[in-house]
Each structure stands twice: as structure tokens, then as C-alpha cells.
């Protein structure tokens, strides 16, 4: 099967006439979050009437979570086949598992792991035409709730997006597992989640803008984005501290929901804009790509977008929050030299090619992008001169 796929949402949600594209809201059937919910998986799988599940999980994940998960399924009288996820959401990896599972009569795929395992699980389930159940082990990304996968080459180079007609049937987030992971993952997830509201707002207010699936944003997705940002401002620092001490508390529960559910619903149905355009473009700089997580790049992209929108107070408010939790606020913190003209040109060219940069309401050209990025960079340098960069250095100590 071809990536680029058999399901093209842009055709389904194409404009219907003078009023343009319809509003579309996309969401998983059930979202379940709490401490120790993973070992209840057998019970939850009754919601999809599972009798025989394929579990997609890495070798490390299997060591950490495989035993209790298998016990839970056995107790619920559900057979399981374990498929070892080898680390990349590539066409090769997905086809390998889909081939191995054909004829095995599995009636759902359960993906347990980080963003790439989750995305691979959706792709395998789509090929088997069965529901997918997502159990993320990190709150670093908003992949769990969406009906799309980002594909990479086996060498890790991005190869585009595949869309699915069905969202995950269940998303089961065990906050005990998230709390045991590194603080940097949760903080990176906050960077990705913080962009949601700003990007969705831009799309809502620009009648020419469209979402990931070619639709218009719903008011629901903007409201979700706003709650997401406010949750991060309020509880972000306390949640990071909770993960640093492997503790589950209310602040952590709030931020895990913001990073996973609110951010996921908000980006898929609200739309993307300059923040993700910049983030994608930073991956073209090898040092940034190797040393930094997606959400860290989105954080810098968000500051640049706010400069582009000429919202100086908001740039400072968001920048202060990023400084407090340890997200990048200047390009040096993404391993990019602000004086490297060739690197900046590469970034600007990539942003101009980003499919959703046209969602920004103003005329976008190389100068607008370059000046916004450097403007945000300078504000970030000033912020760290004032407030220090202790949190950032702590998260990047190794
Ligand atoms: Zn993102």
C-alpha cells in the first residue's frame, strides 16, 4: 500500500460551495487517563469487543510493561500476539508487522510506546482494518489522539503524513508511567502543546485558513486550545517538578491531559500555522535535529509566530514560561548560530515551503520570517540574561 494512502480527507471535506470548507471536529472514541490504568487494559478492551489483540511494543517497553499488560489481557480472556517495534515509523516497519499479522485474526492493535510506536500502530491497524488502541508511555507529543501518522525513512528522515478515516478507539494514558520518564519529555510536550492555541486562533480568524484535513476549525478546538495554554501556564512548572521526583499529583495529571488530549484535539481540528512551520524547518539543521525534541523546536517557533503577529506582551509571557520550565527561547538553545546566514536561509526557505504557512493572515515572505525569528531570538536572549537559564541547562545536562 502506498503512503499518501487510500484515504484523502481533503477530498472528503472539500469546500461545498460559496461558504467554503465545512467545520470538522476529530476525536478518539474514549480517552482514559490515570495512575496504573495500563494494567486495566484488558477491561478497557471490552469497549472494542477485543478477543485477540496485537500488541506493538519495543523491546524495552516489553521489559518494563509487558508482564502486567499480558496478565491484564489474560484475566479478561483476550489472546495477545506481541509484535516488537524496532524504533522507526517507516513504511518498511509498518508493512512488516501488517504482513506478519495478516491471517492471524487479530481484532485490534494496541500500540504501547512513544510517538513513533503510536504512529506505527495506527498504520498497522489501518492496514488490517481493525481499531487501534493507543497507550502512550511519554507525554512528549500529541500523536496519541490523532487520526494520522508521520512516516520516516528507516534512516529517520521525514517522509510525509498518512491520514486515517478512524481516530484511535481508545487512548489509555498511565500517568504513573509518564511520571517515571525523563522530565525533558514532559517539558517538550508542553512546548508542542503551547503552540496549539496560538496556531488554532490564527486559523479561526483567517477565513482562508484550513486545518490538517482541509476543513475549517471548530469553536470547540479553539476553546480546547485556550484551556490547554492556560493549564500549562498554571500547572506547567509544578508538573515538571512532579516528574523530576517521579510523583503523580494533580498538576501532573492536568499537564498530561494538556499535552496529550487538549493539544491533540486542538491541533488536529484547529489547524497549524507558523509555529510548526518553524519547528519543521529547524529539523533541516543537522545539529538542531540531532540534539532537540519536536516540542522544543515548536517552542521557539511559537515565539517567532507571536513576533510575526506583533504581540510583544504575549511573546514575553510565553517566553518567561518557557524559561521557567527549560524550553528554548533563543536559537542558540536549539544548537543554531544566529549569525550563520546559510543556516538562517535554509530555515526561511523551509518555512516558505511549509504547507500551512499560508494560514498566517499577513503577507509572508523571506524577510517577514527571518525578522520574526531573529526578533524572537533577541527577546529570548534578553530573557535569559534577566532570568537565567538554569532549568534549560538542567534538562540538557547530559
Ligand atoms: Zn507538534
Image (cartoon, helix red, strand yellow):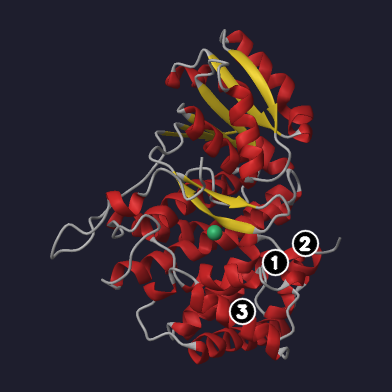
- Tell me the SS state at disc 1: loop
Query: Which of the marked residues, 2 or 1, is nearer the chain's N terminus?
Result: 1
Q: Which mark's residue is nearer the viewer, 1 or 3?
A: 3
> Does the beta carbon at disc 2 come under 8 Å from ligand 1?
no
Q: Dot 1 corresponds to which residue? A: 326
Q: Which type of secondary structure does the marked residue at label 3 adopt? A: helix
Q: CA distance from mark 3 to mark 2?
A: 25 Å
Find the residue positioned furthest to the right.
Answer: 398
Contact? badges 3 and 2 (CB < 8 Å): no
Circles 2 and 1: CB distance less than 8 Å? yes
Point 46% across, 36% down: residue:
168
Query: In the rendered image, which residue does mark 3 sit on?
Result: 347
Q: In this rendering, would 45 be left or right of 182?
A: left
| Tag 2 residue | 395
Q: Is residue 225 left or right of residue 189?
A: left
- Image: 189 above or below 36: below
Residue lying furthest front in this view?
A: 1
User: How far across and how far down the image is residue 261, in percent?
Assistant: 48, 46
- Look at the picture and state if 201 lies above or below 338: above
Q: Measure the C-alpha gap from mark 1 to mark 3.
A: 23 Å
* Front in this rendered view, residue 362 or 305: 362
Q: Quadrant of residue 73?
A: top right
Q: Earlier in the sequence, mark 3 or mark 2?
A: 3
Q: Residue at x 49, y 71 (%)?
A: 354
User: Crowding at label 2, few (<14), some or many (≥20) Cα neighbours within 10 Å?
Assistant: some
Residue at 74% from the left image edge and 84% from the top image edge: 337
Amino acid at each position: 500500500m502506498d503512503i499518501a494512502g487510500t484515504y484523502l480527507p481533503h477530498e472528503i471535506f472539500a469546500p461545498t460551495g460559496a461558504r467554503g470548507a465545512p467545520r470538522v471536529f476529530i476525536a478518539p472514541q474514549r480517552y482514559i487517563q490515570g495512575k496504573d490504568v495500563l494494567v486495566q487494559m484488558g477491561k478497557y478492551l471490552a469497549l472494542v469487543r477485543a478477543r485477540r489483540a496485537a500488541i506493538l511494543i519495543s523491546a524495552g517497553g516489553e521489559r518494563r510493561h509487558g508482564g502486567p499488560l499480558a496478565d491484564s489481557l489474560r484475566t479478561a480472556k483476550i489472546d495477545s500476539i506481541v509484535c516488537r517495534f524496532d524504533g522507526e515509523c517507516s513504511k518498511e516497519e509498518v508493512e512488516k508487522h501488517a504482513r506478519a499479522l495478516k491471517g492471524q485474526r487479530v481484532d485490534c492493535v494496541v500500540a504501547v510506546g512513544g510517538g513513533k510506536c503510536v504512529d506505527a500502530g495506527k498504520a498497522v491497524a489501518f492496514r488490517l482494518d481493525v481499531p487501534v488502541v493507543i497507550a502512550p508511555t511519554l507525554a512528549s507529543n500529541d500523536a496519541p489522539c490523532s487520526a494520522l501518522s508521520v512516516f520516516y525513512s528507516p534512516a529517520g528522515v521525514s517522509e510525509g503524513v498518512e491520514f486515517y478515516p478512524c481516530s484511535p478507539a481508545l487512548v489509555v494514558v498511565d500517568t504513573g508511567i509518564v511520571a517515571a520518564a525523563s522530565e525533558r519529555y514532559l517539558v517538550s510536550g508542553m512546548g508542542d502543546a503551547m503552540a496549539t492555541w496560538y496556531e488554532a486562533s490564527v486559523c479561526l480568524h483567517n477565513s482562508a485558513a484550513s486545518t490538517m484535513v482541509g476543513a475549517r476549525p471548530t469553536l470547540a478546538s479553539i476553546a480546547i486550545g485556550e484551556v490547554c495554554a492556560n493549564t500549562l501556564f498554571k500547572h506547567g512548572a509544578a508538573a515538571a517538578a512532579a516528574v523530576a521526583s517521579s510523583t503523580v499529583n494533580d498538576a501532573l495529571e492536568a499537564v498530561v491531559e494538556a499535552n496529550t488530549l487538549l493539544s491533540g484535539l486542538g491541533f488536529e481540528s484547529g489547524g497549524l500555522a507558523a509555529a510548526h512551520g518553524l519547528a519543521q524547518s529547524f529539523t533541516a539543521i543537522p545539529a538542531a535535529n540531532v540534539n532537540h525534541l519536536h516540542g522544543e523546536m515548536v517552542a521557539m517557533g511559537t515565539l517567532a509566530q507571536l513576533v510575526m503577529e506583533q504581540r510583544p506582551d504575549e511573546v514575553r509571557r510565553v517566553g518567561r514560561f518557557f524559561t521557567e520550565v527549560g524550553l528554548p527561547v533563543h536559537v542558540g538553545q536549539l544548537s543554531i548560530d544566529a549569525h550563520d546566514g546559510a543556516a538562517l536561509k535554509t530555515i526561511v526557505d523551509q518555512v516558505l515551503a511549509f504547507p500551512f504557512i499560508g494560514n498566517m493572515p499577513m503577507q509572508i515572505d523571506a524577510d517577514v520570517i527571518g525578522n520574526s525569528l531573529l526578533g524572537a531570538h533577541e527577546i529570548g536572549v534578553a530573557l535569559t540574561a534577566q532570568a537565567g537559564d538554569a532549568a534549560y541547562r538542567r534538562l540538557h545536562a547530559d
